[in-house]
């Protein structure tokens, strides 16, 4: 009989390889320490998230780090996500609350806010004091119990500004 390991798997989940620079920035600017974590690149969007993460243990510690847009946060702002929702501004329907764990970052350079996930790049929104991405709600919906998320504001809902900074998805 094998004894069950008390060591929890730890993953850093990023959409694209180009986001790797954010891990170094988070270490330098926020003091983030993630030793012994496996780095996973999922690809952008819901289907890539589901295919990449569906077989991971739901008890694993997941740190989602990535770029996000915001209507009013300054560029280069770090945001620790406290809750994630889908962005569907034209309709209302009941959805479960998807809370995100606090990563215990106590840093004046990091704000706390809600993240709205989308299936496409958000170019305009009336939502303030939040960020927009394309993956986090889908990661949270998979049911990970130890999910943390840090987002780096790359743009103010400008695809052009996002591309200039990240050279990301076309």
Image: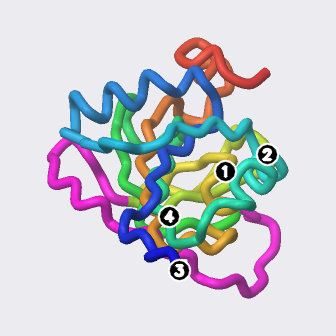
Give the percent coordinates (x, y) of residue 21.
43, 22
- The residue located at (25%, 42%) in the rendering is 33
Residue 84 image position (x, y, % from top left): 56, 66
Mark 3: secondary structure: loop
Q: Distance between the residues labelled 4 and 1?
A: 18 Å
CA gap, disc 4 and disc 3: 23 Å
- Tell me if residue 58 comes above or below residue 24 in the rendering: below
- Foreground residue among 37 and 168: 37
Of circles 2 and 4, which is in front? 4
Q: Nearer the viewer, residue 119 or 88?
A: 119
State the extent of the magenta-drawn residues as a range: 87-112
The answer to which image quadrant residue 41 occupies is top right
Query: Alpha-carbon distance for marks 1 and 2?
Result: 9 Å
Residue 13 shown in magenta = no
The residue singled out by tag 1 in the image is 135
Q: Residue 1: give its label.
A: 3
**Sequence-first tag of 4 and 3:** 3
- The x, y position of residue 70, in whole percent, is 51, 43
In this rendering, position of residue 44 left or right of residue 139: right
Q: Is there a contact, CB below 8 Å, between mark 1 and mark 3?
A: no
SS state under label 1? loop
**Residue at the spot of label 4:** 60
Instruction: Say few, some or many: other residues with alpha carbon within 10 Å of mark 2 (under 14 / 14 to 19 / 20 or more).
Output: some
Q: Residue at x 41, y 44 (%)?
A: 37
Proximity of marks 4 and 1: CB atoms separated by less than 8 Å: no
The residue under the point 74% across, 25% down is 169
First in residue order: circle 2 vs circle 4: 2
Where is residue 101, by image quadrant?
Answer: bottom left
Q: In the image shown, does 60 or 148 lie closer to the viewer?
A: 60
Q: Which of marks 1 and 3 is in front?
A: 3
Packing grade of label 1 (10 A; few <14, some 14-19, many >=20) is: many
């Amino acid at each position: 009989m094998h004894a069950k390991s008390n060591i929890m798997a730890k993953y850093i989940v990023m959409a694209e390889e180009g986001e790797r620079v954010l891990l170094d920035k988070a270490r330098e600017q926020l003091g983030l320490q993630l030793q012994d974590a496996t780095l996973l690149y999922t690809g952008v969007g819901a289907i890539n998230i589901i295919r990449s993460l569906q077989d991971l243990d739901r008890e694993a510690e997941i740190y989602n780090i990535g770029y996000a847009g915001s209507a009013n946060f300054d560029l280069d702002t770090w945001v620790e996500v406290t809750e994630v929702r889908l962005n569907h501004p034209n309709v209302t329907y009941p959805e479960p609350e998807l809370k995100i764990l606090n990563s215990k970052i106590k840093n004046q350079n990091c704000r706390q806010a809600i993240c709205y996930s989308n299936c496409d790049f958000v170019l305009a929104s009336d939502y303030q004091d939040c960020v927009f991405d394309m993956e986090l709600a889908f990661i949270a919906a998979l049911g990970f119990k130890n999910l943390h998320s840090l987002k780096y504001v790359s743009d103010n809902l400008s695809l052009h500004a996002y591309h200039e900074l990240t050279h990301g998805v076309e």
